[in-house]
Amino acid sequence: MNNIGHRLKEVRTERGLSLRELARMASVSPSFLSQIENGKSQPSVATLYSFSKLLGVQIDDLFGPSEDDDIVPETGAQAHEITERSDFTNPSQVWNTSEYTNRISLIHPDHRAALDMAEGVKWQRLAATPEAGVNFMKISYAPGSTSTASGEMLTHEGYEYGYVLEGELEVTVGGEVFSLQAGQSLGFDSSIPHIFANRGDVVSTGIWFVHGVCSRK
């Protein structure tokens, strides 16, 4: 099982399929497939069978020796998958299709699923429970980075809650601009157009909770 990730990536590459294409065909998230290929997670037998059928190989072929046996798999926050904000409508959904979930989720910092969302913007999943429409994340914005490269403001259903750990994060919600310093927090209705930006000269990090179900009273 330790070799499956490298073999799967080799066969996928030989077939000319991108990670995102194979994930879509297998009805799993790109994040989950990335975790398998990087040796951070192991697929179920059913998922492994699905991969083998889609790639046109026997399951045994995925247990064979890899050309990259001497390569140490990436682990932890260094194994970032690159995605685009336009790939999903709601940030609460980005990891929901992953099989890497449990009713009780304890995640070591070295084993967090991570995404590069835009130039200088990284998300790390802090808990992997199967609850739909919810994400608990650590986010970081490098100096000069923004939610979207085009500067387009975002809208989606639900609510967001954030707490800045270090640095400064500028959050524009509707016509209001909030400059959050370390220790400050904010919650808002995500259906209001919004965008995040780091206008400072140090990395801004924070804890973010996104709930995709809108429940106004």
Image (cartoon, rainbow, N blue to C red):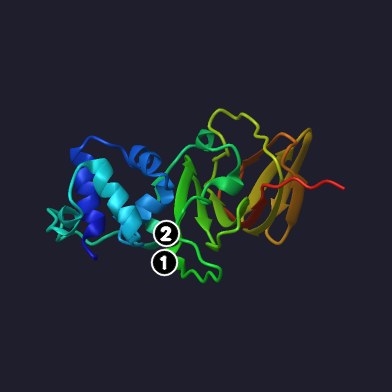
Q: Nearer the viewer, residue 11 or 125?
A: 11
- Image quarter hosting the N terminus: bottom left
Q: Is residue 17 above or below residue 37?
A: above
Q: Is residue 21 above or below residue 134?
A: above
Residue occupying the far right of the picture: 217
Q: Which amino acid does label 2 sit on?
A: Ala
Few, some or many residues within 10 Å of mark 1 (<14, 14–19, 20+): few
Q: Which mark is residue 213?
A: none
Q: Is residue 39 above or below residue 189?
A: below
List x then y, in percent, for residue 71: 19, 59
Going 55% across and 71% down the picture, which residue do you hit? 104
The residue indicated by pointer 2 is 77
List x then y, in percent, for residue 93: 57, 46
Going 12% across and 58% down the picture, which residue do you hit? 65
Going 57% across and 57% down the picture, which residue do you hit? 137
Q: Nearer the viewer, residue 122 or 99?
A: 99
Q: Is residue 168 above or below residue 197?
A: below
Few, some or many residues within 10 Å of mark 2 (<14, 14–19, 20+): some
Going 55% across and 28% down the picture, which residue do you hit? 150
Q: Residue 110 carries which label?
A: 1
**Is 174 placed left or right of 122 in the picture?**
right
How much space separates mark 2 and mark 1, taking CA atoms?
A: 6 Å
Q: CB of mark 2 within 8 Å of CB of mark 1?
A: yes
Among numbered discs 2 and 1, the one appearing first in the sequence: 2
**Is 46 placed left or right of 146 in the picture?**
left
